[in-house]
Image (cartoon, rainbow, N blue to C red):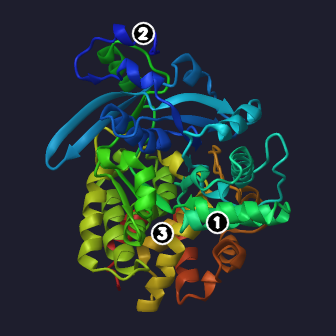
Amino acid sequence: MNLSKETLKQVTARGITKPADAIFSLPEKVLQFGTGVLLRGLPDYFIDKANRQGLFNGRVVVVKSTDSGDSGAFDRQDGLYTLCVRGIEEGKKVEENIICSAISRVLSARDQWQDILRLAHNPEMQIIISNTTEVGIQLVEDNIHHVPPVSFPGKLLAFLYERYKAFNGSPDSGMVIVPTELIVDNGKKLAGIVKELALMGQLETAFLGWMEQHCRFCSSLVDRIVPGKPDAATLQQLQHDLGYTDDLLSISEVYRLWAIEGDEKVRKTLSFAAADPGVIIEPDIEVYRELKLRLLNGTHTLSCGLAYLSGFNTVKNAMDDTAFSTFVQDLMLKEIAPAIPYTLPLEDARDFGLKVLDRFRNPHLQHQWISITMQYTSKMKSRDIPVLLRHYEQHDTPPPHFVLGFAAYILFMRGGQPPHPVNDDKAGYFADLWKQYPAPEVATLVLKDKSLWGADLSQLPGFEGAVRLSLDDLINKGPAATLAKLTTQKSTI
């Protein structure tokens, strides 16, 4: 039996949270750019929970912006999907199976753009959410009259302009826009790009005023490990226990955080926040962003290449290995935590880090390292380079675990034999370097490239030499021996 609205009544297994029939008639209030598991496992999860509590009473229209992937499962399942929450919360084991019903439908930007624009005429539509990866929020030359515009900011501007015209610029028609892309000040950056596109397109001054006064671009950060569909054996067992098949079934950890920068007006619009303490709406969310971005995301980024090259498929597999687990812990607590570029007590950072380590060890999560390497370079720049620069404000020697993680990144970007996927905007750049130069020169050229990092990293005392040495060890001795060498060295920090 396949999960769908039609088959819901046949789902009779115990312990499954199912939607009530009334939820399917709720109005569409949210436009969401992105179909990924993170959005389904966090924002859509919160909205679903609020709907079941009668607090938000609205559903989500999802925009599929890219040509990759198949949205057919959403159509076949009437937007329903199962979120299997697994982990430990306050010392207690948690296992929840939730059939989420927040999504009403999925529209293709390429094939159904006019239908998407018609949603701008819906007075109930209040909120726009996005997760288009870090490269999605960038200024590119675009035209809002294209069908559809090329970029996410272009699509967003076209929708807002349609909204403005549909309601004659009324104050009540303004939208709350909450990007979840993992970049600093994502809301402010998106607002700036959209405004610049509007100026480039010579849109009327009155529209710019409406957008600035009545639309709220809220910076936010999301923190929940949602690795998506489990391995085949686990999926088969879950579907057997549930009593149905679900092509969109995902696993997530218990921990959840969506910190949103906003005031009381934003809080009123985002009324789903009252359903779960994991949604935080405050005027300043910087401390949450820094802790999550550096200790969880930054550790992931500095570990993923080394883990993959070491033969570990998942985060849990790597954390079961004593040497690699020690590497991750020392990297996080001894090098990243003291160098977070934000003023906060070190003890707070380490307490947060210990929670992250427990999350990494969650036996129910099969978080693939290869998926963490996606857009590796932009993640390294935004998550880890500020930590490295802060470290050098405090010390004049290279951080050894950071060095090894960075060297593994350079080697991973080579592609390898047999080849592994390199899903990164800079993949061609690295392929050219590796074809033209030996490994030490590749390392030097990468470190010197200010266009990659915003700084010449070869100027940091001892960093270039240390990276070149670690890269040589990785190539000639292998990751295991290189890790073993690191654990026998005493940190100078």
Q: CA distance from mark 2 to mark 3?
A: 52 Å
Q: Nearer the viewer, residue 189 or 50?
A: 50
Kind of residue sitting beneath label 3: Leu
Residue 404: percent from left, percent from top: 48, 69
Q: Quadrant of the N terminus?
A: top left
Residue 122 placement, left or right of 255: right
Kind of residue sitting beneath label 1: Glu
Q: Mark 2 falls on what kind of element?
A: loop
Q: Nearer the viewer, residue 406 or 230?
A: 230
The residue identified by callout 1 is 212
Residue 481: percent from left, percent from top: 42, 61
Q: Residue 407, located in which quarter of the rendered image?
A: bottom right
The residue identified by callout 2 is 7
Q: CA distance from mark 3 to mark 1?
A: 45 Å
Q: Nearer the viewer, residue 412 or 123?
A: 123
Q: Which badge, 3 or 1, comes first in the chain's sequence?
A: 1
Q: Mark 3 falls on what kind of element?
A: helix
Q: What residue is at 72 percent from the left and 48 percent from the top?
A: 155
Crowding near pointer 3: few (<14 within 10 Å), some, many (20+)? many
Q: Is residue 16 above or below residue 161?
A: above
Judge depth for marks 3 and 1 and give the one in front: 1
Q: Quadrant of the C terminus?
A: bottom left
Kind of residue sitting beneath label 2: Thr
The residue identified by callout 3 is 404
Q: Which badge, 2 or 1, comes first in the chain's sequence?
A: 2
Crowding near pointer 1: few (<14 within 10 Å), some, many (20+)? some
> In this view of the protein, can residue 362 be seen by the observer?
yes
